[in-house]
Image: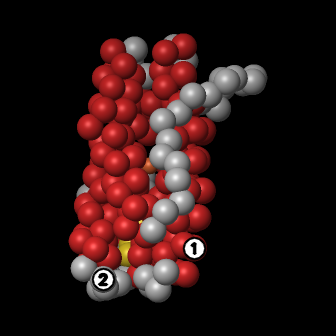
């Protein structure tokens, strides 16, 4: 694997891993603050980020050894509204800057597996940003958002509220590949 693509995947792995932990922490805070549906949303998206981290890790399975990894990551444990704002900022950074740049580099270097791993994550992050924005509007109005079951694709991390789609719109797998957070 080309060095630049490998470095980008390591950074993405770091970012996804930290997002996974951060959302679990912010989810616990949301539960304590009396926003159980926000807590459930954080738990679902945390699992989607685990899917992304796993895909990136497997994509660079042949790259062995120790590396210093630098990743963009949000910090701070504030109110649930502030935590949602941090989550939206992090997701938007991935959607607007990080993944488009990583995808372009991987395409240029003809690293097909890396292109796929980053494209799947990129599409899923868009769904995360939208769900977090919805949740924040409700929390800012003083109410836990009304959220039905949250469905997460185990293959690409695509996340949607409501019924499981017939096929994942991002990676095309069937309904049996979805995990439900109800
Ligand atoms: Fe992700
Ligand atoms: Fe995300
Ligand atoms: Fe999928």
Q: Nearer the viewer, mark 1 or mark 2?
A: 2
Q: Residue 82: in sight, yes or no?
A: yes
What SS does tag 2 mark? loop
Other-residue count near label 1 (Cα within 10 Å), few / some / many at <14 / 14–19 / ≥20: some
Q: Residue 36: in sight, yes or no?
A: no
Query: Where residue 64 appears, x then y in whole percent?
Result: 72, 24
Which quadrant, please, contains the C terminus? bottom left
What SS does tag 1 mark? helix
Looking at this view, name the residue that lies furthest to the right. 65
Q: Residue at x 49, y 15 (%)?
A: 4
* Side (left or right) of 64 relative to 175: right
Is the C-beta separation of discs 1 and 2 under 8 Å? no
Residue beneath disc 1: 28
Q: Residue at x 31, y 85 (%)?
A: 143
Query: Where residue 53 appears, x then y in whole percent?
Result: 55, 45
Q: Nearer the viewer, residue 55 or 73?
A: 73
Q: Quadrant of residue 157?
A: bottom left
* Side (left or right) of 156 relative to 62: left
Query: Where residue 84 appears, x then y in whole percent?
Result: 38, 62
Q: Quadrant of residue 151?
A: bottom left
Which quadrant, please, contains the N terminus? top right
Residue beneath disc 2: 142
């Amino acid at each position: 694997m080309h060095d630049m693509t490998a470095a980008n995947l390591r950074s993405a792995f770091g970012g996804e891993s930290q997002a996974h932990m951060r959302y679990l922490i912010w989810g616990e805070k949301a539960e304590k603050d009396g926003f159980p549906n926000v807590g459930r949303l954080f738990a679902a998206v945390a699992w989607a980020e685990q899917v992304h981290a796993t895909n990136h890790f497997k994509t660079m399975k042949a790259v062995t050894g120790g590396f210093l990894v630098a990743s963009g990551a949000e910090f701070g444990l504030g109110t649930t509204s502030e935590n949602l704002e941090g989550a939206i900022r992090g997701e938007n950074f991935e959607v607007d800057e990080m993944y488009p740049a990583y995808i372009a580099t991987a395409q240029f270097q003809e690293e097909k597996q890396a292109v796929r791993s980053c494209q799947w994550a990129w599409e899923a992050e868009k769904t995360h940003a939208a769900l977090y924005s919805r949740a924040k509007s409700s929390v800012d109005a003083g109410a836990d958002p009304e959220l039905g079951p949250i469905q997460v694709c185990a293959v690409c991390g695509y996340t949607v509220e409501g019924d499981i789609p017939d096929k994942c719109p991002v990676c095309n797998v069937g309904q049996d590949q979805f995990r439900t957070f109800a």
